[in-house]
Amino acid sequence: MLSSLKAFTRSLGPVQSAFLTGLRERTVLGVRTEAGEVLVPPVEYDPATAAELRELVEVAATGTVTTWAWNPEPRAGQPLTTPFAWVLVRLDGADTALLHALDAPGPEAVRTGMRVRIRWAAERSGAITDIACFEPYESGTAAESVPHAGEFDDPVTGIVAPARLDYTYSPGRAQTRYLHALAERRTVGERCPSCAKVYVPPRGACPTCGVATTDQVEVGPRGTVTTYCIVNIKAKNLDIEVPYVYAHIALDGAGLALHGRIGGIPYDEVRMGLRVEPVWSEDGRYPDHYRPTGEPDADYDTYKELL
């Protein structure tokens, strides 16, 4: 199982800012379209006419389930840690439905048309997670939407949205041999029998010639920095101090460059042509970073085709 975790920072327009700030204040806001429909969550442009939308209205914290699906095994980061239902809820006063979690004892307790209400999070910051979940609520009265100025103290103007992807990767024949070699602190590529280019990591076939690559070739371990960038923003959950350098490195004997972090040298001394060697991780499964070898820089002509 592999994981990819990223975070995206974005600024908010006036409608989204009012919506998220409202959630922090336990207020749900929608926006009215030219046709008179109330959209929740709100958008800043009419999906039918593309007209700019600014008329905010407050809707109720109660609503009706329009459809649902049971989630028997919640994953990390989902709203609830116990089994729950994903539901689309049309809040009273809204014409569209909001997706969120419903806390219910089992699928037999969920049905289309059931009445629910928002359970607010104890601590709120101006995010959709300020709605902890929905919960069943017996009420036959549906409230109407009312105009709202959308004005709050200390409005939310930006958000950081994490994105996580867990996936199971099957490496295949070529990459399996490559990974086994890395465990032995060796780097092995495969040579195309037609153009003779050595691919690292190997792909099992030459993308240029379209033929299988079966001839294994050990490359490196030393190589040359072809291009690089200086990273000035610290990544979440990455214990590396900024600034640091990430580079494309053409290992000796390889027909294309792979990427790796450069260490053991000040970031502002990294340069094209710098000769480097791998420093392996403690478990020996992959190079942790590359450091200078002390050799003279490589001539540009020796790596210009690998940029």
Image (spheres, grey):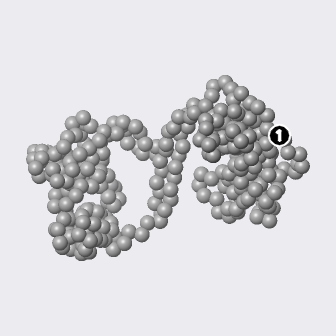
Furthest residue to the top?
Answer: 153
Residue at image point 18% right, 73% down: 193
**19 to 255, vertically: above or below:** above
Q: Seen in the image, is 58 located left or right of residue 11?
A: right
Which residue is nearer to you in this view: 170 or 155? 155
**56 to 47, vertically: above or below:** above
Q: Looking at the picture, how far across and down is residue 224, in whole percent?
A: 18, 50
Image label count: 1
Q: Is residue 126 visible?
A: no
Residue at image point 34% right, 70% down: 176
Q: Is residue 166 visible?
A: yes
Q: Seen in the image, is 307 located left or right of residue 76?
A: left
Q: Seen in the image, is 159 located left or right of residue 32?
A: left
**192 to 51, vertically: above or below:** below
Q: Looking at the picture, how far across and down is residue 113, in whole percent?
A: 81, 57
* Displayed quadrant of residue 109: bottom right
Which secondary structure, mark 1? loop
Which residue is nearer to you in this view: 93 or 107? 93
* Kind of residue sitting beneath label 1: Glu
Residue at image point 36% right, 36% down: 232
* Displayed quadrant of residue 153: top right
Residue at image point 66% right, 36% down: 19
Q: Looking at the picture, how far across and down is residue 191, in whole percent?
A: 20, 69
Crowding at mark 1 (Cα within 10 Å: few <14, some 14-19, many 20+): few
Q: Looking at the picture, how far across and down is residue 29, in whole percent?
A: 71, 37
Which residue is nearer to you in this view: 305 or 232? 305
The residue that disc 1 covers is 144
Q: Seen in the image, is 257 located left or right of residue 81?
A: left
